[in-house]
Image: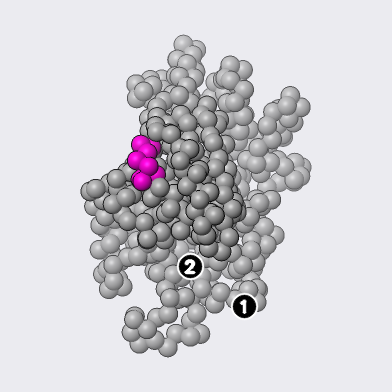
């Protein structure tokens, strides 16, 4: 499929009808690859190239022609780019009239379009106030500085470590950015102490800082307080670690750096379909909220792709009694070979491990897939069992220790702090690198609000997790890992 990229790139000359037709055909072929290619990386590369061409390069004549010819499922893609380009060129009134016509003709009113025109079309967007050559970021983390009387690292309590390590990784990226770029970075850190009242009191200081961006908090109760402030002040807030979708519901300035559970499930379904050839799947669920979110994402995506899903639900109390064991044994006995088995169970290690052990006992030949907890929390299931199945799992943080980017960050962190970087530190580093990249390239004079710019930002490849929002308010990138006899590897 790469010849299509060359074809588009080589036909960037303007004003030639024949070339325009070639570019149009190239874009149509490109989206066909994005829809149908069996290789996930090719599909994603094609989709990213398609969006990049629409939002950055395609002439208005080409957008109009494409809109008339593409399938209904892609008309919205073209219209979003068309209207965005008009707004960016200062033709907001014309864009709004086109938007109204699009809705009148039963076009989809996406969150992206609503962000441009939604609440009050006659009211100008208010971009975040940017000062020349300085980027201002506020950060809220649970650091418990009022209790910091420790002399040795071994004395630091666990409640402090997560926020402290995240900050250290974030600060490392800020220092690196400052050394390589002319822009200055103002980073104001607030200690939430994981206390909602204390966090609310600190909000009084924010208005005088003129922040471009807010990062935090780690825990949902404090994040909700920041969310209200961010929405009222129209300052983008990035929630760094929580995947809770409730934080972004009915919000226009709040982003989740981690993908939601539903996104985890959808990405696993897509991987199973395209990369493992699964056409029929069984989903085991204990009915809990976290499990159901993963199961919902998997089921909806797998059915959309044309697959068949059977859901096996069981009711779990406080312990795995003999009736539940018997019920699970019966359900697992119904699983056939050559199917996909997805176990999105998040808070029930006993039941999740029992299902896998029964699949092993019955010698089922299946594509086995699990929730993130199979890697991070479920320790009773022998690793060799996971390796025998070559079990797949999704995760929000996973890095390759041999990659040059990781080695560089590792050495810098070790030099600065005297310890190897933890997952928390790597996540802070990655998020800072992504945000600073976007803030540096953002041009406030073009009039597009910063949240809109973040939504359409191109793929950013990090050490532990890639970032791409695809016009959403939660990160749409998920790592898929696999257990093998040679270790755990990332496969997507």
Q: Secondary structure at mark 2?
A: strand
In-image side of 420 versus 12 (left or right): left
Q: Residue at x 66, y 34 (%)?
A: 91
**Disc number placed over residue 445 in the picture, else none:** none
Left or right, residue 153 beside residue 96: left
Residue tagged by mark 1? 198
Q: Secondary structure at mark 1?
A: helix
Q: Which residue is found at the position 37% from the left and 42% from the top? A: 362
In the figure, 452 relative to 78: above or below? Answer: below
**First of labels 1, 2 by sequence position:** 2
Q: Is residue 117 left or right of residue 144?
A: right
Confirm whether the magenta stretch covers residue 360. Answer: yes
Q: Quadrant of residue 274?
A: top left
Residue 301: give x, y in percent of width and height: 54, 35
Outermost residue to the top: 18
Crowd rating for badge 1 (residues with CA inside 10 Å; few <14, some 14–19, many 20+):
few
* Frontmost residue, 199 versus 491: 491
**Of residues 424 and 362, which is closer to you in this image?**
362
Q: Quadrant of the C terminus?
A: top left
Establish if 210 lies above or below 292.
Answer: below
Of tags 1 and 2, the one toward the viewer is 1
The residue to which callout 2 is attached is 187
Residue under the image location 46 percent in, 29 percent down:
279
Visual colour scheme: one colour
In percent of width and height, residue 396 lies at: 44, 53
Q: Which residues are magenta?
A: 359-366
Q: Quadrant of residue 117?
A: top right
């Amino acid at each position: 499929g790469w010849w299509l990229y060359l074809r588009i790139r080589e036909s960037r000359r303007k004003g030639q009808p024949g070339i325009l037709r070639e570019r149009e055909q190239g874009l149509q072929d490109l989206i066909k690859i994005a829809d149908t290619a069996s290789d996930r990386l090719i599909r994603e590369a094609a989709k990213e190239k398609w969006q990049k061409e629409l939002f950055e390069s395609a002439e208005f004549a080409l957008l109009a022609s494409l809109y008339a010819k593409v399938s209904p499922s892609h008309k919205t893609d073209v219209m979003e780019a068309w209207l965005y380009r008009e707004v960016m060129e200062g033709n907001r009134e014309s864009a709004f009239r086109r938007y109204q016509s699009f809705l009148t003709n039963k076009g989809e009113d996406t969150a992206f379009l609503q962000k441009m025109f939604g609440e009050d079309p006659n009211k100008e967007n208010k971009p975040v106030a940017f000062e020349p050559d300085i980027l201002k970021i506020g950060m809220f983390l649970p650091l418990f500085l009022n209790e910091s009387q420790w002399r040795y690292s071994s004395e630091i309590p666990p409640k402090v470590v997560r926020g402290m390590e995240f900050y250290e990784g974030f600060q490392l990226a800020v220092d690196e950015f400052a050394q390589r770029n002319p822009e200055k970075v103002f980073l104001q850190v607030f200690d939430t102490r994981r206390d909602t009242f204390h966090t609310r009191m600190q909000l009084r200081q924010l208005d005088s800082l003129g922040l471009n961006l807010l990062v935090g908090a780690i825990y949902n109760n404090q994040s909700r307080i920041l969310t209200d402030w961010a929405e009222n002040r129209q300052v983008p807030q990035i929630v760094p670690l929580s995947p809770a979708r409730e934080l972004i519901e009915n919000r226009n300035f709040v982003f989740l750096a981690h993908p939601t559970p539903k996104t985890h499930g959808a990405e696993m379904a897509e991987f199973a379909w395209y990369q493992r050839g699964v056409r029929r799947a069984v989903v085991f669920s204990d009915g809990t909220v976290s499990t159901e979110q993963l199961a919902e994402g998997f089921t909806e995506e797998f059915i959309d792709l044309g697959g068949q899903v059977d859901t096996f639900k069981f009711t779990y109390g406080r312990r795995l009694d003999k009736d539940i064991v018997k019920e699970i044994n019966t359900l697992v006995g119904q699983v056939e070979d050559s199917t996909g088995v997805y176990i999105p169970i998040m808070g029930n290690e006993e039941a999740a491990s029992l299902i896998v052990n029964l699949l092993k006992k019955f010698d089922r030949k299946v594509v086995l897939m699990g929730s993130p907890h199979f890697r991070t929390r479920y320790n009773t299931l022998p690793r060799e069992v996971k390796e025998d199945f070559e079990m797949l799992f999704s995760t929000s943080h996973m890095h390759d220790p041999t990659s040059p980017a990781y080695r560089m960050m590792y050495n810098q962190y070790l030099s600065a702090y005297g310890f190897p970087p933890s997952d928390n530190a790597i996540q802070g580093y990655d998020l800072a690198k992504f945000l600073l990249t976007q803030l540096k390239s953002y041009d406030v004079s073009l009039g597009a609000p910063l949240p809109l710019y973040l939504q359409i930002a191109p793929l950013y490849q990090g050490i532990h997790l890639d970032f791409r929002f695809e016009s959403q308010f939660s990160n749409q990138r998920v790592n898929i890992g696999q257990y093998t006899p040679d270790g755990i590897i990332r496969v997507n």
